[in-house]
Amino acid sequence: MTDRTYGTRLPGMPSEPLTGKLVVIEGADGSGRTTEVALLKEWLEVQGHAVVDTGLRRSDLVSAEIDRAKQGHTLGATTMALLYSVDFADQLENKIVPALTAGSTVLADRYVYTLMARAVVRGASREWARELYGFALRPDVVVFLDARPEILLHRAIAKYGSLDYWESGMDLCLSRDLFESFFLYQEKLSHEFDWLAAEYGFQRIDANRAPEQVHADVQRRLAPLYGAEPSPPSTPDGAGRPPVSRGRRKAASA
């Protein structure tokens, strides 16, 4: 494997080149990442590319344990970071690297950047976060869907009917009020994502718009990676609108 990690490789990683492409879609909860991943997957598959999607808390090894640990609202920041790093490492070894070795595109709905931002906001140093997730592969491109906090709030309420304890930063004791805590937490995350965007070269997309508009912009950013032409822009009557996957899975908050 051509060494493209940020730090130390995981033991046992293959030595052959990774011919596939790793595309990361980042952004806060409610920014439209899952919708965009579904649209991108359909767009790429229509062009004949094999696509594997991944995301946070999808490891067979520890995802259920993370769910149980978060239910009691008592999970410590360091323990949370370590559990998520194990989740990511398991997926990297057993899903991401095999797919890239086979020449597939891996679409990641969030990556280690969200995990680093969460860890730093909860008191870790940036250097500690870098070291913890240093075994991660460098993506071919990172697209960050940038949405205003009030848009995130509206979408969260519309989708889940309430705000998530962890996505509102209630464990940080920023405020006793759930809504105020949500905005304070998003502000802290936004600050950290600004730093990550500059450090790791994110391509930022305005995610305050309709999914079709966001998808058209993302397509234009990714088309050169595949030597492809983006789909024609949507028209008022819906002609040229990117297809929406019928089997889109409703993703739980990660």
Image (tube, grey):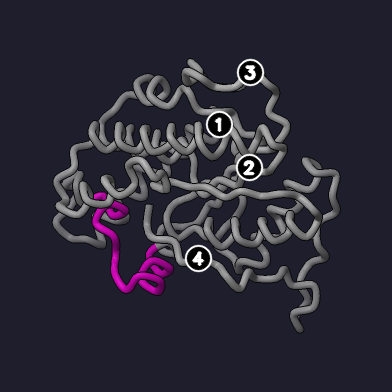
> Residue visible at 36% across and 40% down?
61
> Residue visible at 79% across and 48% down?
223
Q: Distance between the residues labelled 3 and 1?
A: 30 Å
Label 2 vs 1, first from the N-terminus: 2
Choose mark 4 or mark 1, whichever is in front.
Answer: 4
Q: Which amino acid type is shown beneath numbered disc 1?
A: Ala
Neighbourhood count class around disc 4 (C-alpha, 10 Å): few under 14, some 14–19, many 20 upward: few
**Element class at badge 3:** loop
Q: Which mark is residue 198?
A: 1
In the rendered image, residue 205, in percent from the top left (x then y), is placed at 62, 51
Q: Mark 4 = which residue?
A: 249
> Residue visible at 42% across and 23% down?
130
Q: How far apart are marks 3 and 4 (CA)?
A: 34 Å
Q: Mark 3 = which residue?
A: 15
Q: Mark 2 = which residue?
A: 23
Label 3 vs 1, first from the N-terminus: 3
The answer to if 223 sits in the magenta stretch is no
Compared to residue 240, the image places residue 52 above or below, namely above
What segment is highlighted magenta in the picture? 153-169
Observer able to see residue 226: yes
Compared to residue 159, the image places residue 143 above or below, namely above
Neighbourhood count class around disc 3 (C-alpha, 10 Å): few under 14, some 14–19, many 20 upward: few
Q: Which amino acid type is shown beneath numbered disc 2?
A: Val
> Residue visible at 35% across and 70% down?
160
